[in-house]
Image (spheres, rainbow, N blue to C red):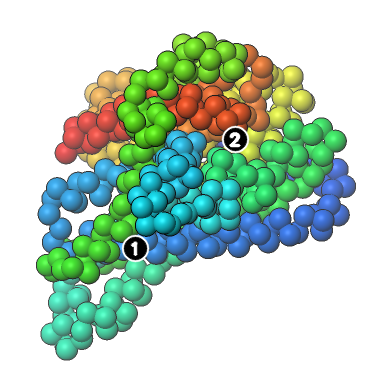
């Protein structure tokens, strides 16, 4: 028993050191600076900003959860043809990993003054002018968070034992009564968990607000970034960071508690599709798919909606001159950050997920904590680390991205560890294999597909980040998401669309890698 505890302790040291320095230390520095900086009084001046952020996040999450439940209901309770089921799965997954700036480009092309929707409505004498309004932010957030409900509540709904519904029918209950009395109470924890997680994402949104809404509809995340840029307002940024950290941590932890509740598992109960079912399926799916498709094709769409390579020509002729950095340097920095972040997060998550998969609750809690801290909050902590320890802020970006991806990477690898047969582990111990030999000769080969999938997700998260790289980058450094944002902000929309298509192409390559590794698991 003593040896087992010693091995657990030695295995726990690397991830504990990693999280202590790159997660807990920046949070501790922020808390220390908050309490010693005398900025509590400043919060009264910005209470309106906090209330607005709570309202918009609540409304956005409600719409996203409602639309997500429509798709989840069809996938769980209707005999949907496999072709449409695959489309729904693919669209939901892709929209979950695309960068916020790319989503914003898709909405510009859909809802802009000369966008796809206004082109259709023009012959009818109608016009939609929604960009840079409150509703543009709400729609953008709803689009981005529909997949959260599909993943959490939808998966629970599909696993719910269909015999319970069949038994209620025998007792004379109709579809609505069966749903309200049986399905809804059992699904309530997963629905609440998906709503709360969507709330966190909407509350800490950065790219969507900056591009679709502007400073007028700032979230705390955007406000922190804006105040941080002005050194005279540094204390205000710290105060707002602390408030956001407390709110997000409370909501994220509540979401994780609700997500732990399991439904009775069994074969699903499905009925035939009807007209209403097709409507409930296609409306929210189209809401996701149209901006997604337009964003992917944005680099080929020129004036008047014609397809052309002109945007790419303009990008290389004048767009890169404006950015002040060569194209290959921007791609190299983006890929390097992604690979470095994924390498660190997968290495740390291998240890964390090993213990969490074996029921060590402490490591399960550790893996959830990063989801309770926003990108800008952590970035503020990293700025304090650079001030206290003299680190270059750019060198901290890979660690920031790795911490942000820890929850999903641990979740993926946790599932992988549970597939490793205990007999294999025990046999290797009998043969005298050391821990290092077992790791490289047994565990990693068995977990290869899970590791690749986790690596790909971590890279996608790194590619998608905008707030962190904007706060921690310096002159002469830029990623693709930064480039798209800078070009859009300077009204170089044509060049921004071309660079966005390149960014989307890289993210989709990662998505294809994820799908291929899923095939290996099966």
Q: Residue at x 37, y 57 (%)?
A: 124
Q: Is residue 123 left or right of residue 520?
A: right
Q: Is residue 470 left or right of residue 235?
A: left
The image shows residue 158 at horizontal and vertical percentages of 24, 60
| One can see residue 485 in this view | no
Most foreground residue, 92 or 425: 92
Count the numbered circles shown: 2
Q: Quadrant of residue 126?
A: bottom left
The quarter of the image holding the N terminus is: top left
Q: Residue at x 39, y 69 (%)?
A: 188
**Secondary structure of residue under mark 2:** helix
Most foreground residue, 338 or 507: 507
Q: Is residue 215 left or right of residue 144?
A: right
Q: CA distance from mark 1 to mark 2?
A: 30 Å
**Disc ID at residue 69:** 1
**Disc ID at residue 140:** none
The image shows residue 315 at horizontal and vertical percentages of 47, 18
On screen, residue 48 above or below 465: below
Residue, disc 2: 467
Q: Residue at x 34, y 68 (%)?
A: 187
The image shows residue 507 at horizontal and vertical percentages of 37, 29
The image shows residue 400 at horizontal and vertical percentages of 57, 31
């Amino acid at each position: 028993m003593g040896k087992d505890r010693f091995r657990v302790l030695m295995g726990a040291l690397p991830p504990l050191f990693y999280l202590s320095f790159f997660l807990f230390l920046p949070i501790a520095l922020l808390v220390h600076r908050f309490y010693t900086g005398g900025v509590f009084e400043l919060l009264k001046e910005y209470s309106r900003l906090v209330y607005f952020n709570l309202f918009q996040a609540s409304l956005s999450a409600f719409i996203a959860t409602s639309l997500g439940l429509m798709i989840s209901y069809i996938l769980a309770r209707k005999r949907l043809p496999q072709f449409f089921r695959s489309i729904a799965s693919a669209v939901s997954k892709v929209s979950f990993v695309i960068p916020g700036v790319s989503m914003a480009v898709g909405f510009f092309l859909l809802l802009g003054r000369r966008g796809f929707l206004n082109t259709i409505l023009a012959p009818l004498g109608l016009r939609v002018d929604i960009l840079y309004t409150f509703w543009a932010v709400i729609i953008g957030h709803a689009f981005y968070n529909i997949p959260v409900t599909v993943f959490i509540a939808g998966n629970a709904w599909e696993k719910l034992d269909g015999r319970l519904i069949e038994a209620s029918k025998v007792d004379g209950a109709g579809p609505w009564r069966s749903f309200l009395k049986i399905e809804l109470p059992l699904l309530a924890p997963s629905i609440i968990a998906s709503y709360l997680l969507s709330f966190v994402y909407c509350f800490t949104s950065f790219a969507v607000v900056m591009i679709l809404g502007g400073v007028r509809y700032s979230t705390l995340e955007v406000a922190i970034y804006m105040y941080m840029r002005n050194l005279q307002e540094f204390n205000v940024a710290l105060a707002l960071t602390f408030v956001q950290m407390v709110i997000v941590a409370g909501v994220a932890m509540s979401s994780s508690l609700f997500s732990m509740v399991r439904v009775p598992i069994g074969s699903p109960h499905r009925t035939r599709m009807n007209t209403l079912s097709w409507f409930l399926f296609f409306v929210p799916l189209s809401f996701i798919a149209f901006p997604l498709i337009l964003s992917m094709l944005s680099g080929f769409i020129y004036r008047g909606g014609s397809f052309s390579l002109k945007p790419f020509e303009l990008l290389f002729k004048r767009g890169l001159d404006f950015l002040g950095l060569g194209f290959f340097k921007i791609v190299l920095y983006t890929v390097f950050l992604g690979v470095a972040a994924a390498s660190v997060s997968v290495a740390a998550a291998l240890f964390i997920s090993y213990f969490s998969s074996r029921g060590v609750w402490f490591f399960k809690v550790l893996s959830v904590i990063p989801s309770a801290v926003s990108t800008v909050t952590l970035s503020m902590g990293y700025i304090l680390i650079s001030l206290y320890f003299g680190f270059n802020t750019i060198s901290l970006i890979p660690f920031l991205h790795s911490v942000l991806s820890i929850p999903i990477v641990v979740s993926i690898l946790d599932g992988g560890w549970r597939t490793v047969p205990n007999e294999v582990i025990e046999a290797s111990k009998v043969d005298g294999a050391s821990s290092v030999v077992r790791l490289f000769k047994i565990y990693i080969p068995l977990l290869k597909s899970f590791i690749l999938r986790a690596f790909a997700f971590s890279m996608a998260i790194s590619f998608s980040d905008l707030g962190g790289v904007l706060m921690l980058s310096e002159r002469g450094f830029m990623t693709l998401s930064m480039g798209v944002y800078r070009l859009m902000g300077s009204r170089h929309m044509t060049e921004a669309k071309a660079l966005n298509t390149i960014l989307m192409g890289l993210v989709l390559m990662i998505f294809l890698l994820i799908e291929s590794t899923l095939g290996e698991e099966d």
